[in-house]
Image (tube, grey):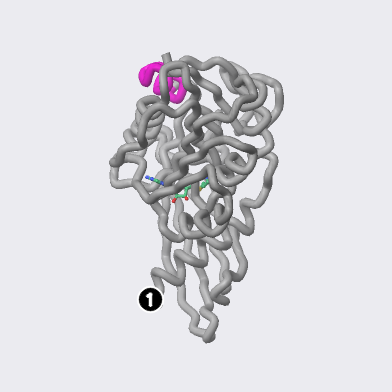
Amino acid sequence: MNRDFIAKHWYASVYEQFENQTYDVEFLLNVLKEQTDGAPQNILEAACGGGRICVPLAEAGHYVTGFDADEHMLLRCYRRMKGVKNIRCFSADATNSDWGTGFDVVVMAGNILINIESELDYAAAQVTFIKNAAKALRTSGHLYLDFDLHCDPAAFFNRLCESSYFSGTDDLGTSGRTVSYGSVYDPVTQICSGVSHWELTTNNGEQFILPTRWYKHIPTQTQVYDWLKDAGLTIERTYVNYSDEPIPEPITESTHRATIWARKE
Ligand SMILES: C[S@@+](CC[C@H](N)C(=O)[O-])C[C@H]1O[C@@H](n2cnc3c(N)ncnc32)[C@H](O)[C@@H]1O
């Protein structure tokens, strides 16, 4: 196995060990109950990762399709969906592939809007995700969008200090941790970037370090709402921090978890 395989396999595993909360999944299931007639929905999850969200949706009786660009994540999803009949998954890059059509609900959750990997300009990739979601919906179908909405990105992202976000051991016996040295936000481009590395030890004791760099475009509330409108999606309901409260307009506190339920016209 080469180092790239070992590192990506490890990351997919520790991502799931850490992102193992279920309240966002329960919240989504409750929104679906509240906003639809309770009948099983035909749902597409874009960037479904290891199936943390799409598999419970299928187990709750919905007809689910999921896709992701990362084969290591997807492999975990295939394992998790074993024995569940009403789900199928495929491998695709969301920015340059066909999402299908006619879905009742498209789910873009797990903060995918600011975790996109693509060759496109970041803001263009965000717009493409939203447009493709709208295209995949039937008329009067809904987009469920769940992401971190930052009111003051500079305060949140401008920090220089060492921290470790993920650590753990995968099923191949690779252990390690991610180490970040901080990030910087540019208020003109709205791009935030950071440097980090992964420190890994394979099951035969070989140690290696993988340098990583990341960058994201941090959209404003107005940008996201405009992108939805331009894609023909009308916001019907918003939720802040997985509560019944709507997202304040404009947002005032630094960071909110924003959940949006928007109908395709
Ligand atoms: C933060 S994870 C969220 C995964 C899953 N939705 C969850 O909440 O557990 C982001 C996922 O988006 C996928 N992703 C990022 N960019 C993508 C793209 N352009 N096309 C398809 N998947 C993408 C990654 O491979 C990763 O699995």
Q: Is residue 209 left or right of residue 24?
A: left
Give the image location of residue 259, x and y in percent.
58, 28
Q: How many marks?
A: 1
Question: Alpha-carbon neighbours of circle 1 within 10 Å: few (<14), some, or many (≥20)?
Answer: few
Residue pictured at 45% horizontal, 57% vertical? 195
Vertical comparison of 120 with 135: above or below: below
Q: Which residue is mark 1?
A: 2
Where does the C terminus fall, quadrant-wise?
top left
Relative to the observer, which residue lies in front, 56 or 222? 56
Residue 149, horizontal then vertical, whole percent: 55, 31
Going 41% across and 69% down the picture, which residue do you hit?
A: 5
User: Residue placed at 54% from the left, 81% from the top?
Assistant: 203
Magenta residues span 223-232
Image coordinates for residue 260, horizontal then vertical, percent: 55, 25
Q: Is residue 33 visible?
A: yes
| Residue 162 seen from this side | no
The quadrant of the image that shows the N terminus is: bottom left
Provide residue 222's location: percent of width, then percent of height: 46, 20
Q: Quadrant of residue 94?
A: top left
Where disc 1 sits, the SS reads loop
* In magenta segment, residue 225: yes
> Hey, what amino acid is under mark 1?
Asn
Q: Is 188 in front, or is 174? A: 174
Q: Residue at x 58, y 30 (%)?
A: 40
Task: Let me know if residue 264 is in the magenta part.
Answer: no
* Residue nearer the viewer, 49 or 117: 49
Query: Is 39 situated above or below 1?
Result: above
Give the answer, above or below, for where 58 lies relative to 38. below
